[in-house]
Image (cartoon, grey):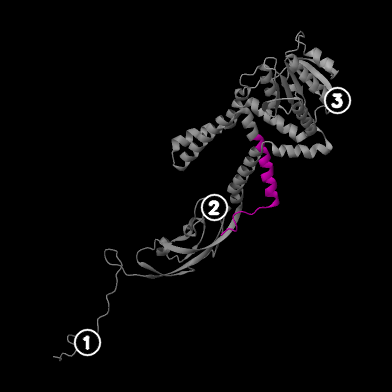
Amino acid sequence: MAGSWIEVRLVDVLDVALVSIFLYLVIVWMRQARAGLPLVGIAILGGVYLAARQLDLHLTAWIFQGFFAIFVIILVVIFQRELRQLFERIAVFGMLRRNGTEASADVQACLVRSVLEFQRQGIGALIVVCGRESVERHLEGGVALDGRLSDALLASLFDPHSVGHDGALVVSGDRIVMFSAQLPLSSDFSQIGSRGTRHSAALGLAERTDALCIVVSEERGTISIARDGALREIAGHEALESELRDFVALGRPGVSRRQRWLRGLRQHWVERIAAVVLTAGLWAAFVPGSQVLEEELTVPIRVENVPAGFALDRTDPTEARIELSGTRRDFFLLDPRSVEVRIDASAIGMGRRSFELDREDIEMPAGFSLVAVRPSRVRLSVRAVPLAPDGAPLVPEPARPAAGSGGGNGGGAPRG
């Protein structure tokens, strides 16, 4: 009736793509911030509110309406820190910021040698290799140091007798910019397990930035990597080299941009698919159906309240063309039989025979507005009907056959 339900345009594809990106960031943020359970609870309350509206539970709907009126404030209070991280991620993504200079092959080799030496000697260490995002806002304390990275400098900074050996060392490009820094701790105990504070700090920063954190455990003698909100152990010289090489390649401008996109597609692919599917479903459910259309219907004209003493002979015309405005969704669900023109003929007794059609004469479902009605005037033809003393219409008796017409008793009885 209103054309095809879904008409996809190029701008709609762009609309779905932009919302999918935003929704993907929200899903990843929910997973990293473990905000899924509170949001599920809010979604359940939203479902109860919608059900109360449909079932006309006015008190329940009124209470929940007040709750959702301050819904945004509730979200800000509950997820203040997580929302700030989300907006920071969006800002960094939009600016495509590159933090520092890429680490050269010599710097990568120096890091690998030093980390393996720390593991061999049982020395605990926490090294942060900066990515594109800034990490300064997440650091507490620390000592600024603009020194070129080397094996000797790393060894001296993580010497167990050094005052700042328990803190984190921050590497940007081929420079050590800070040591003895304190990182935010993660509360994801499912990943941390029985590991110590260094692992919690490494994972905490990896949840908030795109930095690569390398942890050497002095108790376990293991090497762990924290990256993109995930903490895992690695084994061997080649595994550590591969992690550093892959991390640096993704941050390298120019030719490696394609590699960044390919890796991005491989990571969090479930969340990406979920974001696209959910966005496409929301678009199909709301966007096409929300388009405002104008449709014309041909509907019957019904005459009501004909006063006593009159009978309706003819209605001219018997149908009207009604032009309505409404959403595509409403037209899709519209039953044409629910639209009628009703004329109140109670004024016939005062001599009125012509009626102007207006909005009050049109019966239609809620959500529609009247654009035009054609014709704009209806004429009724009526005749007077005699009334009995009690006000009931008199119905003339059928005429009796005249004498001699062959309709008497027996048909052939003699006269006289």
Q: Which residue is mark 1?
A: 403
Q: Residue at x 22, y 87 (%)?
A: 403
Residue 161 marker = none
User: Is any atom of residue 70 visible in this view?
Assistant: no
Residue at far left of view: 416
Q: Amino acid at mark 3?
A: Asp
What is the x, y in percent for residue 333? 52, 54
Q: Which residues are magenta?
A: 1-26
Q: Amino acid at mark 2?
A: Asp
Q: Is residue 230 left or right of residue 179?
A: left
What is the x, y in percent for residue 168? 74, 17
What is the x, y in percent for residue 277? 62, 44
Q: Which residue is mark 2?
A: 330
Q: Earlier in the sequence, mark 2 or mark 1?
A: 2
Tell me the distance, in whole angstroms, between the alpha carbons under discs 2 and 1. Answer: 68 Å
Residue in the foreground of this view, choosing between 369 and 309: 369
